Amino acid sequence: MPYSEVAFNLPEMTGLSGKQIEAHLKLYAGYVKNVNAIAAKIDEYKKDSEVNAIALSELTRRYAFEWNGMRLHEIYFAGLGGDGSMTGALADTLTTYYGTLDLWKNEVKAMAMMRGIGWVLLVIDRETKTMRNIWVSDHEVGHLAGCDVLFALDVWEHAYLLDYLPAQRADYVNAVFANVNWVATEARFAA
Ligand SMILES: [Fe+2]
C-alpha cells in the first residue's frame, strides 16, 4: 500500500521562516513520492529477479535512502512548532544521563557542526534501553541496528539555507531548539 504524506501545520516560528519550512516540506513530499515509486518498480522487477538482479539491488539500496529520508523528516517536523520547553520522563532521563539537559543539547549542537550532510539523532536501544546521540550521513548511513529514533535534527543545508548562510549552522540549530515541540519526542520515548 502506498505511503501518504503526513500533514504538518506548523505555526510561525522565530528563526525558521515559513518560506524555509514550505520548501523543506516539498522536499519531504518528494521522499514519500519516491518511496512509493521505487516500491512499485521493485514489485515489477522482482517478478523476474534473476534477469533484473542489478536493477533490483540498486533500487533496494536507493529505497533505504528515500525511506529514511521520509521517516526522519516526519520525526523532524513533528518535533517543531513548540515553545522549546522540554519536560517529561525523557527529559528527566536525559538529565540523569548528562547531569543537565543543556549538556545533552550541547552534545547535539557540537555533533551538528559535523562537516557534510546528515542528521544528529537521539536513539534508544530497544534491548538495553540505553540512549545515545548519533550522526547519520545522508539519511541512511550510520544507523545503529536495533535502535529507535527519538529525536531528529536535520543538518542538511537544505534545512536552513533560505534563512542562514552555511557558516551559520549553529544559529539554525539554536532556532530548532527554540522551537522544539517535545511532546512527540516524549510520546516516542513512552512507547
Ligand atoms: Fe531535510
Image (cartoon, rainbow, N blue to C red):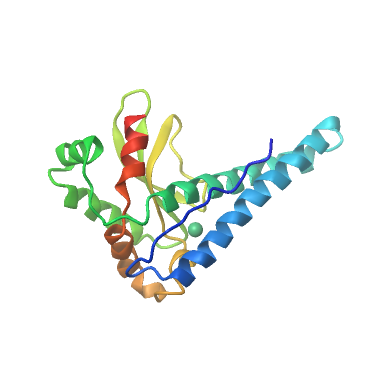
Query: What percent of the width, then of the height, locates residue 9?
Result: 46, 56
> Which sits in the foreground, 30 or 154?
30
Residue at figure coordinates x 36%, y 74% from the top left: 167
Query: What percent of the width, then of the height, locates residue 76?
Result: 42, 51
Instruction: Give the left or right position of residue 127, taking residue 30 as reference.
Output: left
Residue at figure coordinates x 37%, y 36% from the top left: 188
Instruction: Give the left or right position of residue 128, taking residue 59 as reference.
Output: left
Residue at figure coordinates x 41%, y 74% from the top left: 163
Image quadrant containing the C terminus = top left
Vertical comparison of 167 with 189: above or below: below
Number of numbered discs visible in the structure rendering? 0
> Which sits in the foreground, 151 or 45?
151
Image quadrant containing the N terminus = top right
Query: Which residue sits furthest left?
Result: 99
Query: What percent of the width, then of the height, locates residue 75?
Result: 44, 46
Query: Which residue sits furthest bottom?
Result: 165
Which of the 4 quarters of the picture holds residue 58?
top right
Query: What percent of the width, then of the height, locates residue 104?
Result: 22, 48
